[in-house]
Amino acid sequence: MSRAFVKEDAQGPDEDPPERPVSPQPNYVTPRGLKALQDAEESLLAELRGFEGAQEDASRKKRKRELERDLRYVRARLESAIPVDPAKQPKEQIRFGASIALRREDGARKSIRITGEDEAEEGGETLSWAAPLAQALLGLKAGQTLHWETEAGAERWSVVSIDYGL
């Protein structure tokens, strides 16, 4: 078959998958986030042991390379981890590791926990410390207000409470 009919960016069984990008931001982690990275490393190592000594077909070769890539990523994150103990944060201010209760001026409520990048969930209650909303909240105290611009317009959120319990 002519190379003209082969998709250029298709990954073959003998090609390494693209590396997972590592954030240039400092890698602050909560105790829970550090444990999750350690558990991920352990899980990847266990799965990779299943590939030792076996004759591998193309799909197994591909899966092994993906696991090796993921292990490189997790190890890089573990090596760069900067553990932050939320118990040592100033209790009256929003800092890394804080769980925050917010109330919008219309009465809507929102809970957010500021975490490391690997622990954050898209659209969830955990928010990376580097996210714009987290950056806007850092340093605020209970009772203070945040003016936040959204696609729907300006919103005003009050900090109801700050907690560092895990």
Image (cartoon, rainbow, N blue to C red):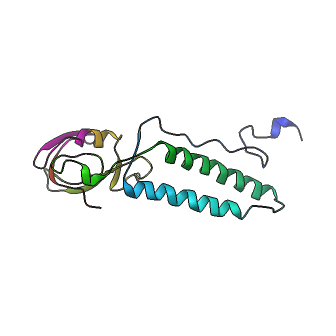
Q: Nearer the viewer, residue 5 or 114?
A: 114
Q: Nearer the viewer, residue 39 or 148?
A: 39
The verdict on residue 144 being magenta is yes
Image quarter where the N terminus lies is: top right
Image quarter where the C terminus lies is: bottom left
Q: Residue furthest right?
A: 1
Which residue does the image show at 84% across and 36% down from the upper left? 3
Left or right: where does residue 89 sit relative to residue 158?
right
Q: Can I make out residue 151 in this image? A: no
The verdict on residue 24 being magenta is no
Which residue does the image show at 64% across and 63% down from the upper left? 46
Q: Can I make out residue 150 in this image? A: yes
Q: Nearer the viewer, residue 104 or 118?
A: 118
Q: Nearer the viewer, residue 69 or 35?
A: 35
Q: Is residue 5 above or below residue 47?
A: above
Q: Residue 51, located in which quarter of the rendered image?
A: bottom right
Left or right: where does residue 48 sit relative to residue 92?
right
Q: Residue 82, located in which quarter of the rendered image?
A: top left
Q: Which residues are magenta?
A: 136-156
Q: How many numbered marks does the figure carry?
A: 0
Q: Percent from the top left, x then y, of residue 53? A: 81, 62
Q: Is residue 153 above or below residue 112?
A: above
Which residue does the image show at 30% across and 51% down from the upper left? 97
Q: Percent from the top left, x then y, of residue 65? A: 70, 50
Q: Percent from the top left, x then y, of residue 88? A: 25, 50
Which residue does the image show at 26% across and 42% down from the upper left? 152
